[in-house]
Image: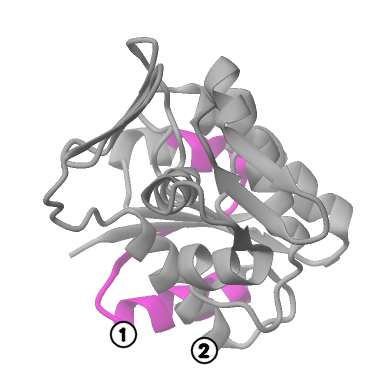
Amino acid sequence: MQTIIVIEDEQDLAELLAFNLTREGFRVLCVGDGREGLALVRQELPALVLLDLMLPAMMGTDVCRELKRDAATARIPILMLTAKGEEIDRVVGFEMGADDYVVKPFSMRELLLRVKAVLRRGVVEPAVTKVLAFGSLHIDMERHEVLVAGQDIVLTSTEYKLLLTLAERQGRLQSRDRLLDDVWGYAADVDSRTVDTHITRLRGKLGVAGDLIKTVRGFGYKLEQE
Protein backbone atom coordinates (compact mmCIF):
# COMPACT_ATOMS: atom_id res chain seq x y z
CA MET A 1 0.00 0.00 0.00
CA GLN A 2 1.52 3.31 -1.12
CA THR A 3 1.50 6.23 1.32
CA ILE A 4 0.38 9.71 0.29
CA ILE A 5 0.89 12.69 2.61
CA VAL A 6 -1.59 15.55 2.28
CA ILE A 7 -0.28 18.91 3.53
CA GLU A 8 -3.40 21.07 3.48
CA ASP A 9 -4.73 23.52 6.10
CA GLU A 10 -8.36 23.42 4.92
CA GLN A 11 -9.61 20.58 7.11
CA ASP A 12 -12.72 19.81 5.04
CA LEU A 13 -10.66 19.50 1.86
CA ALA A 14 -7.99 17.41 3.59
CA GLU A 15 -10.64 15.01 4.89
CA LEU A 16 -12.25 14.79 1.45
CA LEU A 17 -8.89 14.03 -0.17
CA ALA A 18 -8.11 11.43 2.48
CA PHE A 19 -11.47 9.71 2.00
CA ASN A 20 -11.18 9.47 -1.78
CA LEU A 21 -7.50 8.46 -1.83
CA THR A 22 -8.10 5.80 0.83
CA ARG A 23 -10.95 4.44 -1.28
CA GLU A 24 -8.46 4.14 -4.16
CA GLY A 25 -6.23 1.93 -2.01
CA PHE A 26 -3.70 4.46 -0.67
CA ARG A 27 -2.59 4.97 2.92
CA VAL A 28 -3.18 8.67 3.60
CA LEU A 29 -1.68 10.91 6.28
CA CYS A 30 -2.85 14.52 6.66
CA VAL A 31 -1.17 17.49 8.33
CA GLY A 32 -2.28 21.11 8.49
CA ASP A 33 0.87 23.22 8.38
CA GLY A 34 4.06 23.31 6.37
CA ARG A 35 6.61 22.73 9.10
CA GLU A 36 4.83 19.65 10.47
CA GLY A 37 4.33 18.42 6.91
CA LEU A 38 8.03 18.68 6.15
CA ALA A 39 8.89 16.65 9.26
CA LEU A 40 6.25 14.02 8.44
CA VAL A 41 7.52 13.55 4.89
CA ARG A 42 11.08 13.09 6.13
CA GLN A 43 9.85 10.52 8.64
CA GLU A 44 7.50 8.53 6.37
CA LEU A 45 9.16 8.89 2.92
CA PRO A 46 5.81 8.57 1.10
CA ALA A 47 5.14 7.66 -2.52
CA LEU A 48 3.73 11.16 -3.18
CA VAL A 49 3.01 14.48 -1.46
CA LEU A 50 -0.09 16.61 -2.08
CA LEU A 51 1.10 20.09 -1.12
CA ASP A 52 -0.95 23.26 -0.75
CA LEU A 53 1.01 26.41 -1.60
CA MET A 54 -0.62 28.67 1.03
CA LEU A 55 0.16 27.15 4.43
CA PRO A 56 0.65 28.38 8.02
CA ALA A 57 4.07 28.13 9.71
CA MET A 58 5.91 27.42 6.43
CA MET A 59 4.88 28.16 2.85
CA GLY A 60 4.35 25.27 0.47
CA THR A 61 7.07 26.55 -1.85
CA ASP A 62 9.55 26.45 1.05
CA VAL A 63 8.47 22.92 1.97
CA CYS A 64 8.98 21.87 -1.65
CA ARG A 65 12.42 23.50 -1.78
CA GLU A 66 13.58 21.77 1.41
CA LEU A 67 12.34 18.36 0.26
CA LYS A 68 14.13 18.67 -3.08
CA ARG A 69 17.38 19.77 -1.41
CA ASP A 70 17.50 16.62 0.73
CA ALA A 71 18.82 13.53 -1.09
CA ALA A 72 16.54 11.31 1.04
CA THR A 73 13.37 13.07 -0.18
CA ALA A 74 14.43 14.65 -3.48
CA ARG A 75 12.86 11.93 -5.65
CA ILE A 76 9.47 11.95 -3.89
CA PRO A 77 6.96 13.41 -6.39
CA ILE A 78 5.07 16.53 -5.31
CA LEU A 79 1.65 17.53 -6.63
CA MET A 80 0.86 21.16 -5.85
CA LEU A 81 -2.59 22.38 -4.83
CA THR A 82 -3.02 26.05 -5.70
CA ALA A 83 -6.07 28.26 -5.26
CA LYS A 84 -5.06 31.04 -7.63
CA GLY A 85 -4.40 29.18 -10.84
CA GLU A 86 -2.08 31.93 -12.00
CA GLU A 87 0.90 31.03 -14.16
CA ILE A 88 3.38 32.61 -11.73
CA ASP A 89 2.28 30.22 -8.95
CA ARG A 90 2.80 27.19 -11.17
CA VAL A 91 6.16 28.43 -12.44
CA VAL A 92 7.45 29.12 -8.91
CA GLY A 93 6.29 25.67 -7.82
CA PHE A 94 7.98 24.00 -10.77
CA GLU A 95 11.18 25.94 -10.15
CA MET A 96 11.17 24.56 -6.60
CA GLY A 97 10.92 21.04 -8.05
CA ALA A 98 7.20 20.20 -7.98
CA ASP A 99 6.08 17.58 -10.50
CA ASP A 100 2.57 18.79 -11.29
CA TYR A 101 -0.25 21.04 -10.08
CA VAL A 102 -4.02 21.10 -9.67
CA VAL A 103 -5.93 24.38 -9.47
CA LYS A 104 -8.64 24.79 -6.83
CA PRO A 105 -11.52 24.20 -7.11
CA PHE A 106 -10.86 20.86 -8.81
CA SER A 107 -12.90 17.74 -9.40
CA MET A 108 -11.91 14.70 -7.37
CA ARG A 109 -11.77 12.68 -10.59
CA GLU A 110 -9.18 15.08 -12.04
CA LEU A 111 -7.14 14.97 -8.83
CA LEU A 112 -7.08 11.16 -8.79
CA LEU A 113 -6.06 11.06 -12.46
CA ARG A 114 -3.20 13.47 -11.76
CA VAL A 115 -2.05 11.47 -8.73
CA LYS A 116 -1.97 8.22 -10.69
CA ALA A 117 -0.23 9.88 -13.66
CA VAL A 118 2.52 11.30 -11.41
CA LEU A 119 3.03 7.94 -9.69
CA ARG A 120 3.29 6.17 -13.05
CA ARG A 121 6.19 8.43 -14.05
CA GLY A 122 8.29 6.93 -11.28
CA VAL A 123 7.81 3.38 -12.56
CA VAL A 124 10.72 2.19 -14.69
CA GLU A 125 9.77 -0.32 -17.35
CA PRO A 126 12.17 -3.21 -18.04
CA ALA A 127 14.50 -2.25 -20.85
CA VAL A 128 16.62 -4.23 -23.28
CA THR A 129 19.18 -1.42 -23.41
CA LYS A 130 19.91 -0.65 -19.78
CA VAL A 131 22.20 2.39 -20.23
CA LEU A 132 21.79 5.25 -22.70
CA ALA A 133 24.97 7.28 -23.23
CA PHE A 134 25.40 10.67 -24.90
CA GLY A 135 28.92 11.92 -24.28
CA SER A 136 29.18 12.77 -20.58
CA LEU A 137 25.48 12.02 -20.03
CA HIS A 138 24.59 8.47 -18.96
CA ILE A 139 21.07 7.28 -18.16
CA ASP A 140 20.95 4.00 -16.26
CA MET A 141 17.44 2.75 -16.96
CA GLU A 142 17.70 -0.23 -14.63
CA ARG A 143 18.80 1.81 -11.61
CA HIS A 144 16.75 4.89 -12.53
CA GLU A 145 19.92 7.01 -12.30
CA VAL A 146 21.33 9.89 -14.35
CA LEU A 147 25.06 10.65 -14.37
CA VAL A 148 26.91 13.59 -15.91
CA ALA A 149 30.68 13.13 -16.03
CA GLY A 150 30.29 10.42 -13.40
CA GLN A 151 28.34 12.63 -11.00
CA ASP A 152 24.87 11.54 -9.87
CA ILE A 153 22.17 14.04 -10.89
CA VAL A 154 19.06 14.04 -8.69
CA LEU A 155 15.93 14.47 -10.81
CA THR A 156 12.26 14.42 -9.93
CA SER A 157 10.22 11.59 -11.44
CA THR A 158 8.81 14.01 -14.03
CA GLU A 159 12.24 15.35 -14.97
CA TYR A 160 13.57 11.82 -15.34
CA LYS A 161 10.63 10.73 -17.50
CA LEU A 162 11.04 13.85 -19.66
CA LEU A 163 14.78 13.25 -20.15
CA LEU A 164 14.27 9.55 -20.85
CA THR A 165 11.54 10.29 -23.41
CA LEU A 166 13.83 12.69 -25.28
CA ALA A 167 16.80 10.31 -25.02
CA GLU A 168 14.88 7.31 -26.33
CA ARG A 169 13.81 9.44 -29.30
CA GLN A 170 17.25 10.94 -29.91
CA GLY A 171 17.33 13.30 -32.86
CA ARG A 172 13.55 13.26 -33.33
CA LEU A 173 11.67 16.48 -32.77
CA GLN A 174 9.01 16.27 -30.02
CA SER A 175 6.21 18.81 -29.91
CA ARG A 176 5.10 20.25 -26.58
CA ASP A 177 1.70 18.59 -26.95
CA ARG A 178 3.33 15.21 -27.62
CA LEU A 179 5.54 15.59 -24.54
CA LEU A 180 2.56 16.60 -22.40
CA ASP A 181 0.72 13.50 -23.55
CA ASP A 182 3.63 11.06 -23.19
CA VAL A 183 5.29 12.43 -20.04
CA TRP A 184 2.44 14.00 -18.08
CA GLY A 185 -0.25 11.63 -19.33
CA TYR A 186 -2.66 14.32 -20.50
CA ALA A 187 -2.64 17.26 -22.86
CA ALA A 188 -6.04 18.81 -23.40
CA ASP A 189 -6.27 21.31 -20.52
CA VAL A 190 -2.66 21.87 -19.54
CA ASP A 191 -0.60 24.91 -20.50
CA SER A 192 2.22 23.83 -22.80
CA ARG A 193 4.53 26.23 -20.93
CA THR A 194 4.61 23.52 -18.26
CA VAL A 195 6.99 21.71 -20.64
CA ASP A 196 9.16 24.80 -21.10
CA THR A 197 9.53 25.28 -17.35
CA HIS A 198 10.58 21.66 -16.81
CA ILE A 199 13.04 21.77 -19.74
CA THR A 200 14.69 24.86 -18.25
CA ARG A 201 15.02 23.20 -14.84
CA LEU A 202 16.26 19.95 -16.41
CA ARG A 203 18.95 21.75 -18.42
CA GLY A 204 20.10 23.53 -15.26
CA LYS A 205 20.49 20.28 -13.37
CA LEU A 206 22.35 18.59 -16.23
CA GLY A 207 24.90 21.41 -16.47
CA VAL A 208 27.08 21.10 -19.57
CA ALA A 209 25.04 18.09 -20.71
CA GLY A 210 21.96 20.32 -20.77
CA ASP A 211 23.14 21.62 -24.15
CA LEU A 212 22.15 18.25 -25.61
CA ILE A 213 18.51 19.33 -25.34
CA LYS A 214 17.81 21.54 -28.34
CA THR A 215 14.94 23.99 -28.70
CA VAL A 216 13.12 24.18 -32.02
CA ARG A 217 11.41 27.53 -31.71
CA GLY A 218 7.66 27.44 -32.11
CA PHE A 219 7.46 23.66 -32.03
CA GLY A 220 9.23 21.75 -29.27
CA TYR A 221 12.44 19.98 -28.27
CA LYS A 222 14.81 17.18 -29.17
CA LEU A 223 17.89 15.59 -27.64
CA GLU A 224 20.73 15.62 -30.11
CA GLN A 225 24.39 14.80 -29.68
CA GLU A 226 26.87 17.19 -31.27
Residue 202 horizontal side relative to residue 88, left or right: left
Residue 14 horizontal side relative to residue 5, left or right: right
Task: Look at the picture and state if 79 lies above or below 42.
Answer: below
Does the magenta run of residues contain 32?
yes
**Residue farthest front in this picture:** 226
For the question of whether residue 60 can be seen, the reply is: no
Which picture quadrant has residue 60? top right
Which residue is found at the position 39% from the left and 10% from the top?
A: 149
Task: Look at the picture and state if 197 lies above or below 104.
Answer: above
Query: Percent from the top left, x then y, of residue 68?
Result: 51, 31
Query: Percent from the top left, x then y, of residue 130?
Result: 16, 40
Does the magenta run of residues contain 90?
no
Residue wearing tag 2: 109
Identity of the amino acid at label 1?
Arg
Which residue is found at the position 65% from the left and 35% from the top?
A: 201
> Secondary structure beneath disc 1?
helix
Badge 1 density bin: few <14, some 14–19, many ≥20, Cα 10 Å: few
Q: Nearer the viewer, residue 73 or 205?
A: 205
Image: magenta residue range: 13-39
Q: Predominant secondary structure in magenta?
A: helix
Give the position of the N terminus as an image quadrant.
Answer: bottom left
Query: Percent from the top left, x then y, of residue 97?
Result: 59, 39
C-alpha separation, residue under disc 2 versus residue under disc 1:
12 Å
Identity of the amino acid at label 2?
Arg
> Secondary structure beneath disc 2?
helix
Residue wearing tag 1: 23
Q: Nearer the viewer, residue 80 or 134?
A: 134
